[in-house]
Amino acid sequence: MITVEFDYKKATTVEEALAALANGDGKLLAGGYSLVPSMKLRLSQPEFLIDISSISSLKGIQEEDGFIVIRAGTTHAEILNSALIQEKLPFFHTAAGVIGDVQVRNRGTIGGSLAHADPAADWPALVLAADAVIDVVSRNGSRSISATDFFTGLFSTALGENELITAIRIPVPPAGTRTAYMKFEHPASRFAIVGCAVMRFPDGKINIAFTGVAEYAFRDKGAEQAVAGNTLDAASMDAAVNAALQGQDVSFMGDNFASEEYRRHLAKVYLKRALQAVA
């Protein structure tokens, strides 16, 4: 399907992008693998696109001041191939390798994925489990949003009007931290029908996040509390699985790909697999 007519602007700095964004009904274009399909379906009809794919300050992965900083314009392939990510955040490496296909990984960006907030996207679960902070900027200034406050509904986030994601900051995990990302994927799109990200710290704290299950990705506090501080054995894993998805303030999904009942079942199966992987 062809999109409605739109204008195109290319920004070379963040300041240029923000100025253009404040000047009408525009949308930011990074990789385009979320925005362009929605435009083809007429779900999004901006007056113009602001291409930010060439802004150098939005690219790269570094370790800075106790954080691993992934700039918003960093592609999935760059995350997949980063030695720093493989060493310090191995489940980010795993997730990057199961996103879409080679074309999607080479063009799609982590910032674009988070801003789009598809309920079946992979990165939301990862940033939630990693206690990430998402840095954003507008012409009024900059601010940082905890990942646990970022996702607010179906394709909805805490991003304000005319704000742009600049970076994702993840605290460097202490030595001995173990991570896992398990996904039951749609065979064509490779989106998550269910995805589960787990981060287990040396002190016994465990972060558990799901994507694909509900209208937006979420941390499962009940499952975390059931297993936190315990020896990670069959009994504690079963306790976490039994507590999972209980009392969540989210709407669980059912569609042509999987019913709500099936998704709930899969979520528990993949949580147990992820816990076994970090045990």
Image (cartoon, rainbow, N blue to C red):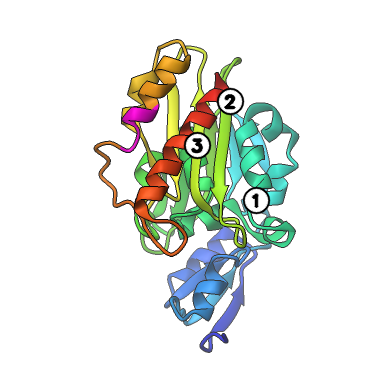
- Mark found first going from the N terminus, 2 or 3: 3
Q: Check disc 1: other Cα within 10 Å, few if <14, some if 14-19, many if 20+.
A: many
Image quarter of residue 84: top right
Q: Secondary structure at mark 1?
A: loop
Above or below: residue 7 compared with residue 173: below
Kind of residue sitting beneath label 1: Thr
Above or below: residue 29 compared with residue 2: above
Q: Nearer the viewer, residue 123 or 172?
A: 123
Is 108 situated left or right of 46 in this image?
A: right
Q: Work out which quarter of the rendered image holds the N terminus and state it.
A: bottom right
Where does label 1 land, which residue? Answer: 74
**Mark 1 and mark 3: Cα distance apart in space:** 28 Å
Residue 99: x and y, percent?
A: 63, 52
Residue 198: x and y, percent?
A: 50, 30
Q: Are marks 1 and 3 in contact (CB under 8 Å)?
A: no
Kind of residue sitting beneath label 2: Ala
Q: Nearer the viewer, residue 116 or 190?
A: 190
Above or below: residue 86 compared with residue 264: above
Q: Secondary structure at mark 3?
A: helix
Can residue 115 be seen from the camera position used here?
yes
Q: Secondary structure at mark 2?
A: helix
- Mark found first going from the N terminus, 1 or 3: 1
Q: Check disc 3: other Cα within 10 Å, few if <14, some if 14-19, many if 20+.
A: many
Residue 275: x and y, percent?
A: 51, 26
Where does label 3 land, which residue? Answer: 270
Q: Are marks 2 and 3 in contact (CB under 8 Å)?
A: no
- Mark found first going from the N terminus, 2 or 1: 1
Kind of residue sitting beneath label 3: Tyr
Q: Main secondary structure of the magenta part?
A: helix
Q: Nearer the viewer, residue 228 or 141?
A: 228
Where does label 2 land, which residue? Answer: 277
| Residue range of the region highlighted in magenta in the rendering | 241-245
